Image (cartoon, rainbow, N blue to C red):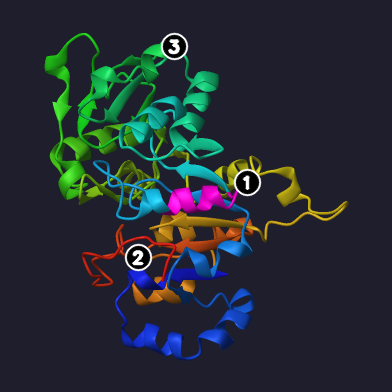
């Protein structure tokens, strides 16, 4: 089943038509994957025991929690619901947890899973002690991920792999700051920028793999739409480069998060395994929903690969008041997440 948070979307013709036959749609949605608008969490909360929650664009924007999020998290906690943070952040889990707490969000979660943790484990197992060109964030000097793995930053002509970790700085050296170059990709997403173009071209020519720790194409960060490493990954892949990627919408990360759910949810009775009591909450059709959510994907002219929450066998809730599709849907600026009518 694929549901909207109805209180967070403008009532266009398509949604008014859905609302008209709401009760009928509710009974058919699980079979046809028709989106169901809802007014708030209270309408569906009793249907689920486990909530997988995306971070950026759902819980916060990188600066502050979204309107009503703290209350919604407290509401789920009061009902003894299990919440698991499932994020495409390239940061390791311990770093992401620290930032999450600094934003003032309640720590009711059972687990905190990031694509950055998965990629770090892969680097540990396969590239420890190697060299890479690191496209990362402007705060890279504080990030010890590569130092901990004894991986050295190197020029694109000498590196063993390209590490897509962020989109603000190209790091070629840890010892000579002058060799590291800022890029405006975070703001403009331009894959034809000379610096990005040079890196991609040389990497493909040398048949060097790109390892992507964050598959997001775009995200709501610091109050604006930002372009993420997944966009560079897609261009690298489109031009024939070999990519190893981690995060949503890949089924493996969803399966790992689901494995953290209480056994009573996964195995309600002997010999019977179900995921019907688990729902994923996200703001991106491509990263979070995907699967069979083809109706809205078609309306927004977005790709709809058969991966993501739906392909994992769980329901999904698309947050639309904020996040990557909010401008496309022409949403009111004062909309908020709520568990009330």
The residue under the point 39% across, 45% down is 55
Q: CA distance from mark 3 to mark 1?
A: 33 Å
- Image position of 172 with respect to 88: above or below: above
Is the stretch drawn in magenta largely helix, strand or loop? helix
Q: CA distance from mark 2 to mark 1?
A: 24 Å
Residue 24 point in image, percent of width and height:
58, 88
Can residue 208 be seen in this snapshot? Answer: no
Start-end of magenta stretch: 72-81
Query: Does the CB distance between marks 2 and 3 fall below 8 Å?
Result: no
The residue under the point 65% across, 58% down is 277
Circle 2 is placed at which residue position? 320
Disc 2: CA contacts within 10 A as few (<14), some (14-19) or many (>=20): many
Does the magenta-highlighted stretch encompass residue 34? no
Q: Which labelled disc corresponds to residue 309?
A: none
Question: Is residue 22 found left or right of 15 in the rendered image?
Answer: right
Q: The residue tagged with tag 3: helix, strand or loop?
A: loop
- Image position of 300 with respect to 87: above or below: below
Quadrant in the rendering for residue 334: bottom left
Mark 2 or 3: in front is 2
The quarter in which the C terminus is drawn is: bottom left
The residue under the point 35% across, 17% down is 144
Q: The residue tagged with tag 2: helix, strand or loop?
A: loop
Circle 3 is placed at which residue position? 129
Q: Please state which of residues 302 and 293 is positioned toward the viewer in this rendering.
A: 293
The quarter in which the N terminus is drawn is: bottom right
Question: Is residue 115 found left or right of 16 in the rendered image?
Answer: right
Circle 1 is placed at which residue position? 258
Query: Does the CB distance between marks 3 and 1 fall below 8 Å?
Result: no
């Amino acid at each position: 089943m694929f549901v909207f948070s109805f209180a967070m979307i403008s009532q266009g013709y398509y949604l008014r038509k859905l609302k008209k036959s709401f009760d009928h749609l509710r009974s058919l949605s699980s079979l046809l994957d028709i989106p169901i608008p809802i007014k708030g969490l209270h309408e569906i909360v009793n249907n689920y025991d486990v909530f997988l929650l995306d971070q950026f664009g759902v819980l916060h924007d990188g600066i502050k929690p979204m309107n009503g999020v703290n209350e919604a998290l407290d509401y789920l906690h009061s009902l003894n619901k299990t919440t698991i943070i499932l994020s495409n952040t390239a940061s390791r889990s311990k770093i992401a947890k620290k930032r999450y707490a600094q934003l003032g969000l309640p720590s009711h979660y059972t687990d905190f899973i990031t694509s950055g943790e998965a990629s770090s484990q892969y680097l540990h197992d396969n590239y420890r002690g190697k060299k890479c060109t690191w496209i990362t964030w402007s705060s890279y000097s504080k990030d010890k991920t590569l130092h901990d793995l004894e991986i050295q930053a190197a020029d694109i002509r000498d590196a063993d792999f390209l590490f897509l970790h962020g989109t603000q700085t190209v790091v070629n050296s840890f010892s000579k700051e002058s060799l590291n170059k800022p890029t405006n990709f975070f703001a403009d997403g331009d894959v034809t920028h000379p610096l990005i173009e040079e890196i991609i071209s040389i990497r493909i020519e040398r048949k060097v793999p790109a390892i992507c720790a964050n598959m997001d194409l775009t995200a709501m960060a610091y109050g604006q739409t930002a372009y993420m490493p997944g966009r560079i990954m897609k261009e690298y892949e489109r031009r024939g480069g070999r990519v190893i990627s981690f995060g949503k919408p890949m089924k493996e990360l969803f399966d790992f998060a689901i494995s953290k759910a209480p056994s009573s949810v996964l195995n309600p009775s002997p010999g019977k395994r179900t995921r019907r009591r688990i729902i994923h909450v996200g703001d991106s059709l491509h990263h979070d929903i995907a699967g069979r959510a083809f109706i809205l994907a078609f309306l927004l002219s977005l790709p709809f690969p058969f991966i993501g929450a739906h392909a994992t066998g769980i329901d999904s809730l698309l947050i639309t008041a904020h996040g990557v599709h909010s401008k496309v849907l022409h949403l009111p600026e004062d909309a908020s997440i709520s568990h009330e009518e």
